[in-house]
Image (tube, helix red, strand yellow):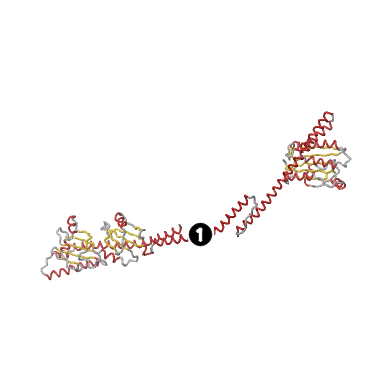
Amino acid sequence: MLQIRNYSQIESIIRQKINAQTGLQVEQVKENFNLLHTNLLRAAFEIENNHQFYDWLTEPVNDETEGDTKKREIETELAYINSRSMPNSVFVYFALVDLSGRVYTSYNPLQPLQAASVTKDPGFAMMAENGESFIWLDEEMGDIGVSSHSERQLALLSVLRNGSDEPFGFLRISFDYDSWLKSIVRDFSVLQNYFILDAEGNVLSRTRSSAVLDPEWIERLRQQRGQLKDYFDRGSNTLLNVQQLTDMNWKLVSQFPFDSYIGDINEMNRRYLTTFTLLIGLFVVVTFVILSRMTRPLQLLQRKMEKSVSSHFRDRIQLNRMDGEVLALAMSFNRMASDIQALIAKLKLEEKQKEAMHFQMLLTQMNPHFLLNTLNMVKWQAVRSGQDDIAETCLNLGKLLENSLNTNVDLIFAKDELELVRAYVQIMQKRWRYPFDVIYELEPALTYVLVPKLSLQLLVENCIHHGFSKLTDQGRIEIRMRIVGRELCIEIRDNGVGLKRAEEMKRLSKRKRDGIGLNNLRERLRLLYKGGGALYARRTVPWDDRSVDDSAACLESLYGRSGPACGKSFSLKTKFL
């Protein structure tokens, strides 16, 4: 579309340039015609008002010799007047007739000219009817046209009166406009056809006999009123420029054929469009071929991918007849399918393991429920038999068992966790032979903070088993919960044998398996708090050493710094919940 638009613009520019040149030439022809028209009227008025012509035409002629002399003088003066219309004088012919019937001409007629051929012209009768002194007529050439190429002429008829009502002669000025038009356009730089049309649309003259003007355009130009302009006839590829000739109601039409200047525009346009269409078609075919080498393998790859997905990635894409980027894409998809299938197999295996573990857990839950029910039965029997210690022990043990059976809860309130610790401590105080006390320090604001379930019970158990087993004095355990910054610090402190002694006793014992309690608690903290919880163990200062502030001891336990060798402390640090 852009190429067609550019071609149309080029054609429009050429047309405007040619129209400017042809318009200038038409203006020149029009001005020349108007100037000649004016000169002929001036010549007629000069002859009518010239006293010499009046004397010549009114004086009687006495003999033949005097008549010949007068004729030569009059015809010489007519030739002089005609010469002043140069360079168009060769196309102008003067004929003068006096009342005696003698004829005087500025040219040599083909045969002797009779006065009746002039005075009997219908134009003089029209002048008499209308009361006019002159008239313009388009009429036949007659015997005048010695140099004419046409049978028509433009004639100016005038009755010479010289200010009186009585005429003293008759004047006819003939203008061979056909020969004049052909002569004036012969030297123009831009060759084109010219036509002269009358008011009825008849072609009066044309510069080339083969030139034809479309009848539709003739009718259109005949009906045109007002200022005329240029037109373009696409049917014949011609440019028309029209001008109105003065006082004659004639139209001067120039016809410029584009075919003679730049060739057949329509044929050039058709060839251009044909070539352009062929190039576009070739481009489309080449583009289709190039894209088919990419889109068809991609479509095939898409279908194979869909098939592989529907088969749960068991099928693989065949790599034959593939190359380039498509081959790399297919290989990547095969690797991805293999990885996905391996992950699926791993997930299935893990699901089977989870199912087996869940089934095993359900089986293991049966025994604690049986034990809990049996324990409740023992408790009520002890109550009925008055064994309060046994009933209390069964009650505390029931709390621990019931809490351990609730596997759906990982975090409980601090007050509930301390209740479990108290139940465990009461059981341990009745079981062990050595005495110990437990002190609980809990700020009221921390009553409902969330802590890991059965975490303090595990640390208290560690203090009793490893700290008091070789202790001869009164045992003591302190459980503190404090806020340090934005974290909850739980410290369980005992006055047992200490970390170093506990390690030595562990090496001397026959127990080969490491304890799993603390490791289990650390793993639970990692899973629950994602690195926001930690467990520390350290040696503590003596109980009666008040020089060490309790909060300082808690902070030391957080960062793992060691104090004097006496007892041990477990510090449990979690996010404040």
Q: Looking at the image, can residue 154 be seen?
A: yes
Task: Give me the residue at 37% from left, 64% from top.
Answer: 261
The C terminus: image quadrant? top right
Image quarter (top left, top right, bottom left or bottom right) of the N terminus: bottom left
Which of 404 and 186 lies nearest the eye of the viewer? 404
Give how far across and how far down residue 407 sits, in percent. 74, 39
Residue 141 appears in which quarter of the rendering?
A: bottom left
Query: Looking at the picture, how far across and down is residue 457, in whole percent?
Result: 79, 39
Residue placed at 83% from the left, 36% from the top?
Answer: 427
The answer to which of 140 and 309 lies nearer the viewer is 309
Q: Quadrant of residue 197?
A: bottom left
Q: Which residue is mark 1?
A: 285
Q: Does residue 240 appear to the left or right of 321 in the view shown?
A: left
Q: Is residue 79 above or below residue 489?
A: below
Residue 482 x, y percent position in the rendering = 76, 40
Q: Is residue 397 left or right of residue 159?
A: right
Give how far across and how far down residue 79 sits, in percent: 21, 68
Q: Amino acid at mark 1?
A: Val
Q: Where is residue 206, by image quadrant?
A: bottom left
Closest to the observer: 429 or 308? 308
Q: Is residue 510 left or right of residue 272?
A: right
Under circle 1, the secondary element is: helix
- Residue 84 can be seen in this image: no
